[in-house]
Structure formats: C-alpha cells, structure tokens
Amino acid sequence: MMKPFQRLKLAGYTQKPGDRMPATAAALSPLIAGSRLIFTGLKEVVHEPWTPGEPAAGQVRVKTLWSQLSTGTESIVFNRRFDPGTHWDQWVRYPFTPGYALVGEIDRLGSGVTGLATGDIVAVRHPHASHAVVDAAAVTPVPKGMDPRHATWFALAKITAVGARAIAYRLGEQVLVIGAGPIGQMSLRWALASGAHRVVALDPFADRLPAALRGGAATTIAMPVADAADAVRAAFGGALPGVVVDATGHPAVLGAALGLTAARGRVLVIGDTGKPAQQHLSSDLIMKGLTIVGAHDGHEDPGWNSDRYHRLFFDMASNGRFPLDGLATHTFAPSQAAEAYSTSESRRGETMGILFDWSKA
C-alpha cells in the first residue's frame, strides 16, 4: 500500500508533496485539521490527513456527520471491475477520491452567502471527507428533524429519480425491479411514487428483500434472474410486467430482463455496468417490440437539476412517502475504510446502506 500523503486544498490551489505553502494559504486563519479517504491503487484505500481550507466568497464549509458508501459505483472502482476504454477507465485515476453522498453541518460561511447559516444541516455531493468546501449553491438543506443518516440516501435517490423520469411510469403499471440493493430499493420506491400499481422486487440474496417489502413492494422473489420466469409470471397474475428495471449493474442481467418484459414493454437500465461489452440483447427486443431506456446521474436539464431532485426526495421522505427505516445496515469509522470496502464486496448479500461516521474520524 502506498504511504499516505498530505495535501492542502484551497480555492485555486492544491498542495502537492514537496510544495511550499503559498503566502495566501499561510495568511488564512485558522486552518483546521481534517481527513479524507483516498484510493491509492487497486484495492488500496487510505484514510489520510487533509486540510480543507477556508471557504471563498459564495462558498460554505461543511463539517461532515455521515457519508454513504455507494456499494455499486465504489465497489466497481475499488476493484477496478471495468473494461479498458470504458468511461470508467477514463474516470478512475490514482489517487482517486471516492464517494458522492455527504451530510454535514455548515461550520463556516464565505462572504456574500445568504439563505444559509452556520449550524444548518445540509447534503453535499462530495467525496468521503471530514469537511467539504463547496459553492453555497451546491448544498441542499436537510429538513429539520430528519435523521442525517436517512438523509445520506439523497444521492442514490436522485440517480434513481432520473431513471423514473426517463422511463415515464404510467398510472397503474406493473413493474419488476431486478436487484434489491441500494439502487433497486430507491427504484422501487420511485416507481410506486410515480403511480405504479404493483411493484415486485427480485434478488438472489433473500436478506435484501424485507427492505423492499418495507418500501412498498407487493411481493418479492428470491432467486437468480435466469431462473425466475415462472415466479415472475406468478407474481403478476400469470402475465409479464410492462416495465422491468435492471438495477444490478451486472452485464448478464439485460438479456434476462428482456425475456421477462411484456410485449411492447419497456426496460430501464439504471445499473451502470463496468463491462458493457458483456451485455447482450435477445430476440425478445425485436419480437416483442421492446424499448430500452438508459438513465444516468448526469442526465439533468434546467428544469430538473440535482437540487430539485434532492428537495423532492427530502420532502417525500419527511412526509413518510419514501420509507427509509432499516436501509442502513453497516457503520464504520473512516479509519476502518479497508474493512468497509471489503465488507461491501465479500458480504454483498448482507449489506445495504454502508455509512462512515465522521464523528470518529
């Protein structure tokens, strides 16, 4: 494992090993001590010291309470489970800062910031770290009284809400969600919130399925997707569902998903595989006249940006329309990061929400 290194990040400047601190950095007072997680190589994670710096004009500094490990994205990156030439391969360069779901308390305001105050609990799309210095416009207030651990689901909720808008659920639809991990859990909740009549969750890991039932699934199927055709028909009264969601990120699932979709139906691919060349179509695509819709976190437009998605999620969760109880299954201190990523990989069927508790940094 590489030796941990320390960096000082300030507006417009990043300290590299061997660099002298610039005068503008030395003039800032006080500079606080912090830490963050870094991938230094294949299956190598370091909890390193880090100085986050002060917010510039229009920025805020957030002291992290909790951050959520994305068991899909971060596991693919940590294990380099992706093919050369893919967007994953172009994205992952070492040292790599993982994570994108942080909830914390504003502890410093830059000049000119309005509408926010120190002590506010906010959500930030930022890598795992003890602090985040970001533009004020990039934070979303968390509703008062909401458990900040529940609030960490805001990022995965946004990603899957993009999928819900892309597939354009119709009132009364029958929906099969393949994969009951974090993305699948959020997907089935959005399907129900969008007017689906019956949503069924399918996953070979039975331990994941009670959370789907708490989220509103009509029933669940605990078996591999390749063996599930009869069980799926039984769950939908002898018919196939009009919408199938592939929330797995596993390349082999797409072909099976096509076979489980009703004629003229739609397949939503929301799980981003690192090996797209291994995804295969079947004759069902043509013979049934199916539509495949892909959705990704980056698919935004002026009317639907991250802040709007986040606020919608927080409003629905606060009103009890987006149940989150029991979704966080594991908590680690940042210093236990290696154990957290190992758990995410080796005990996949037992994990759901994996949180880092930054009070223990």
Image (spheres, rainbow, N blue to C red):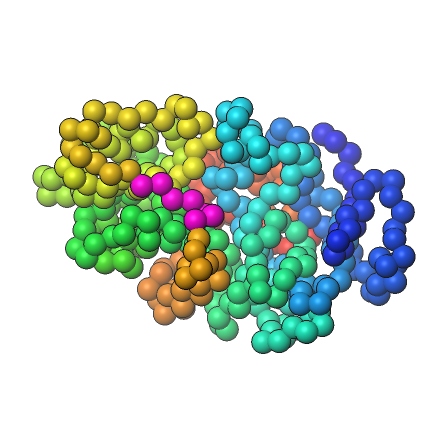
Name the quadrant containing residue 3: top right
**Bounds of the magenta span?**
293-299
**What residue is at 37 percent from the left and 65 percent from the top?**
316
Q: In this figure, what is the number of numbered marks?
A: 0
**What residue is at 51 percent from the left and 67 percent from the top?**
142
Name the quadrant containing residue 285: top left
Q: Is residue 296 magenta?
A: yes
Name the quadrant containing residue 339: top right
Coordinates of residue 59 in the picture (x, y in percent):
67, 65
Q: Nearer the viewer, residue 333 or 313?
A: 313
Q: Residue furthest left?
A: 238
Coordinates of residue 188 in the picture (x, y in percent):
31, 50
Coordinates of residue 314 in the picture (x, y in percent):
43, 65
Q: Nearer the viewer, residue 208 or 29?
A: 29
Query: Viewed as shown, does residue 210 lie left or right of 5?
Result: left
Residue 303 can be seen, yes or no: yes
**What residue is at 48 percent from the left and 53 percent from the top?**
155
Q: Is residue 167 magenta?
A: no
Q: Quadrant of the N terminus?
A: top right
Q: Main secondary structure of the magenta part?
A: loop
